[in-house]
Image: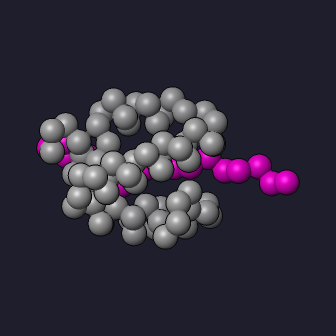
Amino acid sequence: MAKAKKLPSPCIDVCKFRREGHCIGCSMTKTQKKMFKSLKRVDHQHAFVDMLVHQQSDMGKYGHWTPAYLKKLAKKGIAPPFEV
């Protein structure tokens, strides 16, 4: 069984914190960005990205994130942690 690769950060390099402290690019807060960096287990990273996708859905206006993150994953040869 192949070892799962670590996920890259959900950050898509926009980093503008408006929307009540959430980034307009990825929806993470500064605290969430630090939290993701501290996650060592791949299953925890997958759970974090799943939470983030739901957060984006709840907040709305994050349709641009999925294609940008999928491109980032493809460059690294990593399968998406969510259904597209």
In percent of the image, x 38 and y 36: which residue is there?
Answer: 33
Over which residues does the magenta segment extend?
Answer: 1-18
Residue 16 location in percent, x, y?
Answer: 20, 46
Residue 46 vertical placement versus 60 (above, below): above
Residue 11 location in percent, x, y?
Answer: 38, 49
- Specify the principal SS of the magenta part: loop
Residue 12 vertical placement versus 74 (above, below): above
Q: Is residue 38 visible?
A: yes
Tell whether position 12 is magenta: yes
In percent of the image, x 60 and y 33: which residue is there?
Answer: 40
Q: Quadrant of residue 43?
A: top right
Q: Is residue 43 left or right of residue 4?
A: left
User: In this view of the protein, which residue sits in the foreground, 21 or 6?
Assistant: 21
Q: Is residue 14 left or right of residue 75?
A: left
Residue 32 location in percent, x, y?
Answer: 37, 34
User: In this view of the protein, which residue sits in the foreground, 3 or 83?
Assistant: 83
Quadrant containing the N terminus is bottom right
Q: Quadrant of residue 63?
A: bottom left
Tell whether position 4 is magenta: yes
Q: Is residue 21 left or right of residue 52?
A: left
In percent of the image, x 53 and y 66: which residue is there?
Answer: 83
